[in-house]
């Protein structure tokens, strides 16, 4: 398993993070097999959020965790979304959310805590107070954000005594605005629109690990693009490269993300054990520059 630096944390993490959003309705036996498949393939970084399965994803995961050594796991969770109501980065909500996750996961500490969606009412001093307390108590070791632009991160970092280690952003072959705007600089086309404030380059300049969520999806949870009749040209290219590398199209799609020199961490979303193993296998494949651009263009993108 390829490992990367996790921001400025000083730790190394697998370049694949195992997403646990969809495990809430799995049986204990199924979760055991899910966890074993990940661990056996070197993927020991598990991504949670307090809202996944309304908390049940963390609960079912705790049963698998209790049977294994805690030190063999890197556990990340997220907070800040009050489902259907608001986003909340208040001191009280962050601390309460972490305590809830710790209880549901059955652990004394969380390796990484991310703020889930930007809260426009954020008071960075309050976030800093919560982070300081959680770190001092040993409840959380490292911190990051999700879906934030450079100025939002810079504002928060101004008040923090610890580095923002990660930013979890939607990114895939079929959702690549952070790539498109950089390729189409100063052009009169829609792809030139900078929708994220240059977040890709900001994260690279500041040693913040980009975690790509929904790496197999198009749109906003509209479905998987692999073997989807809506994307025939892309799937033909993926199929040809899959044959070349003796891999699956899923593996090639993840390898496309990992090929970027930003050293991103791809967050899987599948509970299918075969597809999970296929995602992890992507760490063993380095596609060429020409192949990377061929996939990019097959997704409907243009080179100016």
Image (cartoon, grey):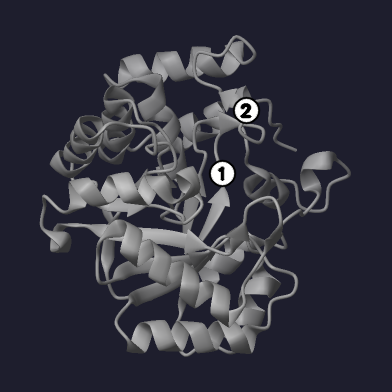
Q: Position of residue 139 (x, y in %)?
A: 32, 77
* Marking on residue 90: none
Q: Position of residue 173 (x, y in %)?
A: 56, 34
69 left or right of 3?
A: left
Q: Secondary structure at mark 1?
A: loop
199 left or right of 12?
A: right
* Marking on residue 171: 1
Q: Nearer the viewer, residue 81 or 75?
A: 81
Write the residue at 43% across / 53% down.
Answer: 264
Q: Position of residue 215 (x, y in %)?
A: 49, 37
Crowd class of label 2 (few under 14; some 14 to 19; many from 20; radius 10 Å): some
Q: Position of residue 273 (x, y in %)?
A: 27, 27
Q: Nearer the viewer, residue 203 or 168?
A: 168
Crowd class of label 1 (few under 14; some 14 to 19; many from 20; radius 10 Å): many
Q: Which residue carries the number 2 mark? A: 297
Kindly indicate the quadrant of the structure image that contains residue 189: top right
Is there CB contact under 8 Å for labels 2 and 1?
A: no
- Mark 2 or mark 1: name the one nearer the start of the chain: 1
> Which residue is at the far right?
188
Write the residue at 62% across / 58% down.
Answer: 82
Q: Is residue 248 visible?
A: yes
Give how far apart the Cα atoms at labels 2 and 1 are: 16 Å
Q: Quadrant of the C terminus?
A: top right
* 146 is higher (above) or lower (below) than 44: below
């Amino acid at each position: 398993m390829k490992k990367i630096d996790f921001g400025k944390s000083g730790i190394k993490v697998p370049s694949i993070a195992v997403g646990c959003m969809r495990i809430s309705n799995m049986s204990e036996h199924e979760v055991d097999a899910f966890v074993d498949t990940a661990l056996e393939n070197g993927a020991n970084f598990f991504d949670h959020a307090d809202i996944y399965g309304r908390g049940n994803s963390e609960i079912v995961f705790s049963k698998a965790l209790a049977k294994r050594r805690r030190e063999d796991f890197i556990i990340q969770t997220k907070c800040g979304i009050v489902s259907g109501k608001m986003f909340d980065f208040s001191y009280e909500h962050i601390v309460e959310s972490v305590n809830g996750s710790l209880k549901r996961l059955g652990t004394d500490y969380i390796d990484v805590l991310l703020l889930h969606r930007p809260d426009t009412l954020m008071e960075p001093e309050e976030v800093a107070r919560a982070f300081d307390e959680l770190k001092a108590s040993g409840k959380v070791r490292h911190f990051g954000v999700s879906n934030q632009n450079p100025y939002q991160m810079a504002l928060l970092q101004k008040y923090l005594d610890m580095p923002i280690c990660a930013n979890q952003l939607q990114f895939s072959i079929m959702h690549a605005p952070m790539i498109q705007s950089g390729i189409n600089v100063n052009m009169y086309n829609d792809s030139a629109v900078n929708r994220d404030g240059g977040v890709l380059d900001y994260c690279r300049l500041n040693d913040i690990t980009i975690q790509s969520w929904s790496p197999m999806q198009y749109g906003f949870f509209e479905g998987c693009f692999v073997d989807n009749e809506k994307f025939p040209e892309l799937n033909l290219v993926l199929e040809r490269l899959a044959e070349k590398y003796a891999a699956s199209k899923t593996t090639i799609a993840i390898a496309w993300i990992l090929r970027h020199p930003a050293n991103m961490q791809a967050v899987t979303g599948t509970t299918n054990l075969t597809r999970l193993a296929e995602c992890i296998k992507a760490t063993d494949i380095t596609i060429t520059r020409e192949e990377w651009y061929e996939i990019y263009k097959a997704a409907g993108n243009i080179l100016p």
